[in-house]
Image: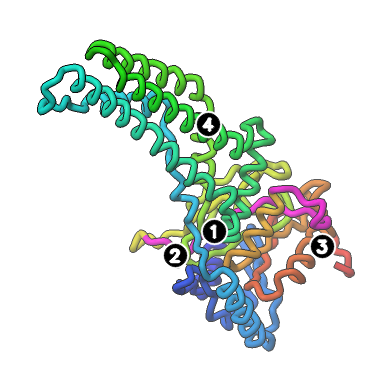
Amino acid sequence: TLQNATMSFCSRFRFSSVSSGINKVRNISFVARCQLTRGFCVVTSDQPQADLLDLERRLDRQLDDTDEQFSDRSLGALKSIPKIMPWHEYVGIAVKRANEVEEDTTIRNSKVRARKLAAASLSTLSKELTVPLGDAFNGFRMATSGLPRLHPFERTLVKLTLRNMEREGHGTLDTALDAIKLLRKETSLCTKASIALGANANSAKEAASHRDACISEVTKLWERHGSSLSTLQGFGRALRALPVPEGDVPAVALVGSPNVGKSSIVRAVSTGTPEVNNYPFTTRGMTMGHVIDPARGTHLYQVMDTPGLLARGDEARNAMEALTLGCIQYLPTAVLFVIDLSGQSGALSTVADQVAVRDYLRRRFPARPWIDVITKSDLPALPMDPAL
């Protein structure tokens, strides 16, 4: 029942793509009261019908402003962050291609011919190692110094992800990039020095010896810096895995206090599989799910499970709460606010605190399409304070 009602609710919010990559929400005048009491939840909209036309006009103005502000930014930029291989794979490929360089048989002098072969082999080795490092450095730099050019939602995700990885002991992305930059420089210096030595070799054997010594030294150099590449590989996996909504599919964000049942709803109505447990802050990131048209196999709409919000000021909010607010602020989603009146959501999610969170969000995002879901309706509700 909830799935059908939510599908009906979301399907009328058409996110039509525009050239800027920002989407618009249209056709919201359908909003009406809806009661679902089938042992799961009650869904209502508190928007009076008389206010709907004004709401649509305000929403259009708000999204038009968003179009202008972020007209040169679109979602999905993080998917282009380069993939990093283990150090030995880079070296293996580079050595293989260096060994494939052929001798110039048109040169009759064997010493000169060996010098040229050694120089060409080491130039190939250097190119095969330094170019991927340069591409990796530039690609990842977008996630730090390039933050202002990212879509604001992805910018929020990057900041929170990098901060969380640093707290978990992975170091900083800047430190990893500095190590990669140093590795690239040392690789280039090593090969250039060996090319110079080979150019002055007194025999073909000496030229080949300088070449082999350089390959051995570069291999040891990359082995020493292998952990830096592994660290960068971890950052890349984390950033590329960040959820990116589909711009042309209607979306709804489930928002509310911790432990009120948001994740259970996402699991029930979509393909999303967030962790569900009876304790606050189970959701430590944003989970994306889809409701699929069984006949066509296409996505009808996308559902976003967000971390819980506490009743406190913005200055006291943690990274998870900032992610939820960023989702509402920067993505053209409808809001499905989840509230538990049973009193069994824990000390952090009292009914009064949940209402306070709801009132705060309604004041901060007055133009967002909104629907309330009262969960755990099979449990006895606490007596309501008339003031709430």
Residue appearing at x 55%, y 59% in the figure: 149
Q: How far is the residue under mark 2 from the one under mark 3?
A: 32 Å
Secondary element type, mark 2:
strand
- The amino acid pointed to by label 3 is Ala
Q: How far is the residue under mark 1 from the one under mark 2?
A: 10 Å
Crowding near pointer 1: few (<14 within 10 Å), some, many (20+)? many
Say which residue label 1 marks.
303
Image quadrant where one finds the N terminus: bottom right
Image quadrant where one finds the C terminus: bottom right
- The amino acid pointed to by label 2 is Leu
Secondary element type, mark 4:
helix
Give the number of the mark in front: 4 or 1.
4
In the image, residue 138 lies at what x, y percent?
48, 45
Say which residue label 4 marks.
182
Crowding near pointer 2: few (<14 within 10 Å), some, many (20+)? some
Q: Considering depth in this image, is 294 or 132 the residue closer to the camera?
A: 132
Crowding near pointer 3: few (<14 within 10 Å), some, many (20+)? some
Tag 2 or tag 4, which sits nearer the N-term? Answer: 4
Q: Which residues are magenta?
A: 298-319
Q: Is residue 382 visible?
A: no
Rendered position, 5 above or below 200: below
Picture quarter containing residue 294? bottom left
Tag 1 or tag 4, which sits nearer the N-term? Answer: 4
Residue appearing at x 67%, y 74% in the figure: 45
Residue 314 falls inside the magenta stretch: yes
